[in-house]
Image (cartoon, rainbow, N blue to C red):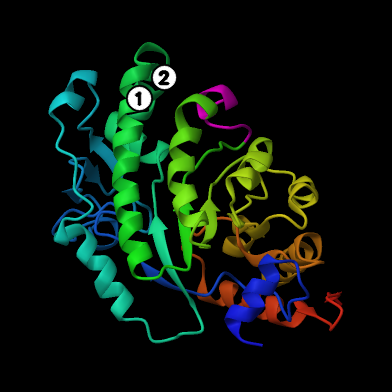
Amino acid sequence: MTKRENALRILRFDRPDHVMTGLPGHWMAYRGCNHEGYDGIGDDNVPVDGSWTDIWGTVWEKKQKGVMGFPAWLPLAEVESLRSFRWPSPDDERICGLIYTMAEARSDMDTFLTGSHRNLLLEKAEQLVGMENLFTYFYTEPNFVKELFHHYMDFQLGIARHYIKLGVEAIQFSEDLGTQKSLIVGPEIMEEFMLPEYERLFRVYREKGVLLELHSCGHVEPILPLLMELGIDVLNPIQATANNLDNIRATTQGRMALHGGVRSDIVLDGPAERIVEETRRRIAQLGSAGGYFCSVDQHLDFPPEHVDVMNRTIQQFGCYDADGRLYIG
């Protein structure tokens, strides 16, 4: 069974051969997707205490190795600044050209051609306006927020046209919607301000049969029905310390695959015996009938030997028989 076929069987809860660590993908991203500037300078190539400006005009500072930077200057902190703001163009060769370069580098055809929409909507608004400002403006300047969201989603739709032109097969959206104990914004705010814009983008991909994976850290249980209604195929990283994973599995069983769930603190600290126990627990809890990609619930700077223990455990205990029954040992 090929990687693609096995992944599709996982997604369909249809007797996969084995548990995988993720959807096998060849990744594409536009310049600026990962907080870079037009010159390509960004999180991954900035030293600690360095700074840079992204394509949106947000100034970032790097404070810790292995951790993304933090906005230090916000171009849309003031409502009036939206009138003169110069939006990046998704058709600017400096931005969209990287997508085509990355697509041309694909060599393994047993993967899904995968595009990225990091900072889907709320997160990018926080990086342009500031979290405290934005959450105040939901109530004091709602028209400003709606206009901001609409303009930004116009950009995302422009990027989507390039992905679709290249034949994208899967998309990963990134939008942290939860804290450790609750949603970041309430359902009323989400319904009024965010859902119309999500639907504009998701509809474009659903009409093309593109697989959709959403990355959202934190507590997401209250919006599981909404995510399934929007057409999300895979939810990541299902943070174990912020959610009831039994409830998440019961709610999504047969309808939406899960990706993650292995506690990152255990993989970080070890020892090997705890990593094996935690990984086996999640495979049994979340993958007994398919619908599960086993991985950590946060990506940190793990000791390589700890990651090897987790991956070997997945290979050993994440196998299904011909009837789709999991051998967990």
Q: Does the segment drawn in magenta span residue 278?
A: no
In the picture of the structure, the residue carrying the numbered disc 1 is: 145
Classify 10 Å Cα crowding around label 2: few (below 14), some (14-19), many (20 and above): some
Q: Quadrant of the C terminus?
A: bottom right
Left or right: residue 116 versus residue 219 is left
Q: Residue at x 41, y 19 (%)?
A: 138
Residue at the front extreme, as displayed: 207
Q: Secondary structure at mark 2?
A: helix
- Taken as a whole, is the magenta stretch helix, strand or loop? loop
In the rendered structure, which disc, 2 or 1, sits on the residue that comes first in sequence?
Answer: 2
Quarter occupied by residue 20 = bottom right
Instruction: Name the quarter where the N terminus is drawn.
Output: bottom right
| Mark linked to residue 108 | none
Q: How many numbered marks have been drawn onto this rendered protein structure?
A: 2
Where in the figure is residue 275, as x and y percent of width and height?
69, 67
**Residue ID at (57%, 25%):** 186
Q: Nearer the viewer, residue 120 or 216?
A: 120
Q: Is residue 323 above or below residue 186?
A: below
Which amino acid type is shown beneath numbered disc 2? Phe
Residue placed most toward the observer, 172 or 49: 172
Report if residue 69 is visible in the image.
no
The image position of residue 38, as x and y in percent, is: 15, 56
Residue 146 in percent (x, y) is at: 36, 26
Q: Which residues are magenta?
A: 181-190
Tell me whether the residue at label 2 lies in contact with that at label 1, contact meaning CB atoms closer than 8 angstroms.
yes
Q: Amino acid at mark 1?
A: Val
Q: Secondary structure at mark 1?
A: helix
Where is 213 relative to 287, above or below?
above
User: Residue 137 at x, y = what percent?
Assistant: 36, 18
